[in-house]
Image (cartoon, coloured by chain):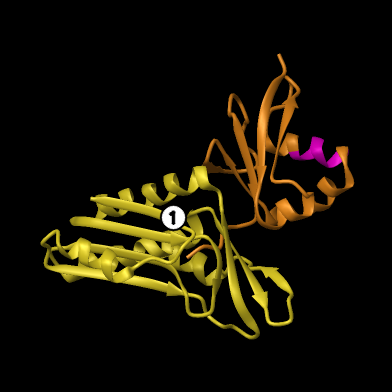
Amino acid sequence: MARILNIVYFAWVKERLGKGHEAMEIPSDLDTISDLVELLSKQAPEYKSVFADLTKLRFALDQEFTSIDASINSAEELAIFPPVTGG
Amino acid sequence: MIKVEVYADDFDAGFEISKLSALGCGAVASFIGLVRGDGDVEALELEHYPVMTQKALRDIAETANGRWPLHGITIVHRVGKMSLGEQIVLVCTCSDHRSAALDSCSYIMDRLKTGAPFWKKQWFKDGRSEWVEERQSDLDAKGRW
């Protein structure tokens, strides 16, 4: 069954995509964040450009840092952003 | 006692520190991070991931609380645009002895730099802006704990 995932973007990722969040219907056979990134990259050139260098991106599922290889499973929110630079 | 706050406005560091001191411990350590004028930087803008920020800062504080015998921890972080010299962050810890207060304060700052969802943008005098990149020295600092 397809599910809806809320995707949120921050910093230059948000600026370059021109949006801070979107809801996406996830295909039932989609497993990891990496699979989703690949799918988005095929959808529009701005995703392809933002996801061109994955070493510059970090991810969080339901507000917990995770790796690009993590399964999305039943998570409700995926965040995609550059390495954090607070403090 | 753990206090975690994220403010858009400036905060009173003296007030926060004296509140921790009032808990009656023998040692209070604090760190205040300010906007630094590197090159032609005239302002900093801090963005964050609100739902995750509280959780991440609280996790860091709780880990510190488990590692050192602390009576209180205060973390205050600002978001939004700030000018040169303005306060960005305050970490304050109190314990019975100085080493626990100083070490835990330093630990919290090192963890916060690489483990809390904040992003800094530098604004330059000529109107340009640029997102700050991750620093290897911050990753190394986290590694020493």
Q: Determine the residue located farthest toward the top in the rendered image.
A: A1
Along the viewing direction, whichever of B47 and A47 lies nearer the viewer: B47
Q: Chain A is drawn in which colour?
A: orange
**A73 left or right of A36?**
left
Q: Which residue position holds label 1?
A: B6
Helix, strand or loop at mark 1: strand
Name the residue rendered at 42%, 64% in the picture: B110
Along the viewing direction, whichever of B140 and B51 lies nearer the viewer: B51
Chain of residue at mark 1: B
Name the residue rendered at 53%, 53% in the picture: B117
Check disc 1 and give the amino acid type.
Answer: Val
Q: Determine the residue located farthest toward the bottom in the rendered image.
A: B39
The chief SS type of the magenta part is helix
**Residue B51 rendering spot, x and y as whole percentages:** 50, 42
Magenta region: A37-42
A72 to A13, vertically: above or below? above
Q: Quadrant of residue A61?
A: top right
User: Does residue B145 appear in the picture of this structure?
Assistant: no
**Residue A62 rendering spot, x and y as whole percentages:** 54, 35
User: Does residue B108 appear in the picture of this structure?
Assistant: yes
**Residue A65 rendering spot, x and y as whole percentages:** 54, 45
Q: Colour of chain B?
A: yellow
